[in-house]
Image: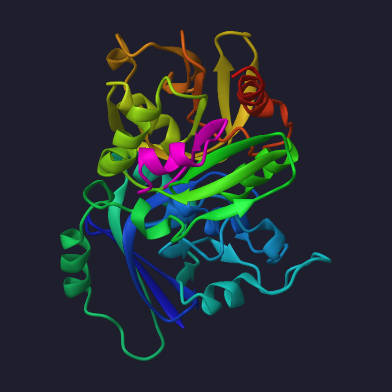
Amino acid sequence: MKGIFVLEDGSIFYGKGFGAEGEAYGEAVFCTAMTGYEEALTDPSYNGQILIMTYPLIGNYGIHESSFQSERIQVEGFVVMEACEIPSHYRSMKTIHKFLSDYKIPAIEGVDTRALTIKIRKYGVMKSALITYTNNPPNLDEVLIKTRNQRSTSEIDLVSEVTTKGVKRIDVKGKYEVVLIDCGVKRSIINALIKRGVNIIIVPANTSYEEIIGYDPDGVVISNGPGDPIRVDYVINTVRKLIGKLPLLGICLGHQILALATGAKTYKMKFGHRGINHPVKDLITNKLYITSQNHGFAVDPLSLNGTGFKISSINVNDQTVEGLIHEELPIISTQYHPEGHSGPRDAEYVFDIFLSWLREY
């Protein structure tokens, strides 16, 4: 099977197709992680995107469902330098080729993904197409037209595609109960709350303020998710009503939603942060954390005046806002994933702060 990867600027990359035969369209983004391809493929925050892995060998330890962050693959397509055909790990259940094929996701290998990453770093994320075929090659002129005409992720409500369709309860017989607004939550966030003995009510992203308050929770978590936070005004409006009523924790997209709900602004980054090696400095403790991140939007620091928020952490590489804490109310948020274990677990302190507020309030 052959593969072709096309960018909206007209660049064409040829390689070997694997996974499913077919075509995919989406925003081309890159991830710098050396491991964690199972987590990345199943992370709902990648919905609407074609994922490029900068590390050259992917699939070497196979696939095991315990690493999944959701119930299915979330990316539209997958681009790698080399896909391992013979994985070596005692837990491996299948190859990455079989995994992608099972979920009908096309992929391509043999592409210089590092050169592709340099291109995106220089010119920014682009619309893209990935075509895999056996016999009939695609008409590249038509593919390029379709690539350029597709809607950008800033024009689509991607959260509605990944949020839970119904209410789910997780009762661990804990003292505290939180409502988790599911904008595309990763399982690792749920597990971090469970580990702390918190009962969880997972609700769809369009759940109203009245419904959430009706559960009589001790706090609310706004999860990560895909796309432009501006497109989920229904979540922003709900969160705005929750402010001042009970403790709130926002992660990734949830962090951006909290900022928007208080009157701040967000913007689209040139190529975003996607990987497990992003250095973050905590401005309160002066500590440095290596964090896991997956986002293409950020909070505008100049728009925070009057919101009640102060910046609690920044990205060491580009000084973007990585954390907020409210000066009067029990509200905290992080742009990075505090539950993501890039090595140490020290970034999990965010959950402990939230838990202390549940006890207090």
Residue placed at 17% from the left, 74% from the top? 142
Q: Is residue 15 visible?
A: yes
Residue 121, by quadrant, is top left
Residue farthest to the bottom, as pictured: 135
Q: Is residue 269 visible?
A: no
Is residue 213 within the magenta segment?
yes
Q: Going by the image, does 91 lie left or right of 154?
A: right
Q: Residue furthest right?
A: 90
In-image side of 350 versus 140 (left or right): right
Q: Give x and y (percent) for residue 350.
A: 62, 25
**Residue at position x 40%, y 29% from top?**
242
Residue 208 on image: x %, y %: 35, 43
Q: Number of numbered discs present?
A: 0
Q: Residue at x 68, y 57 (%)?
A: 67
Q: Which residues are magenta?
A: 206-225
How does the figure colour the protein chain or chains? Answer: rainbow
Q: Residue at x 68, y 64 (%)?
A: 65
* Above or below, comparing residue 285 to residue 209 in the picture: above
Q: Position of residue 221 (x, y in %)?
A: 51, 36
| Residue 122 painted magenta | no
Instruction: Reply above or below: 273 against 95.
Output: above
Viewer-closest of 101 and 173: 173
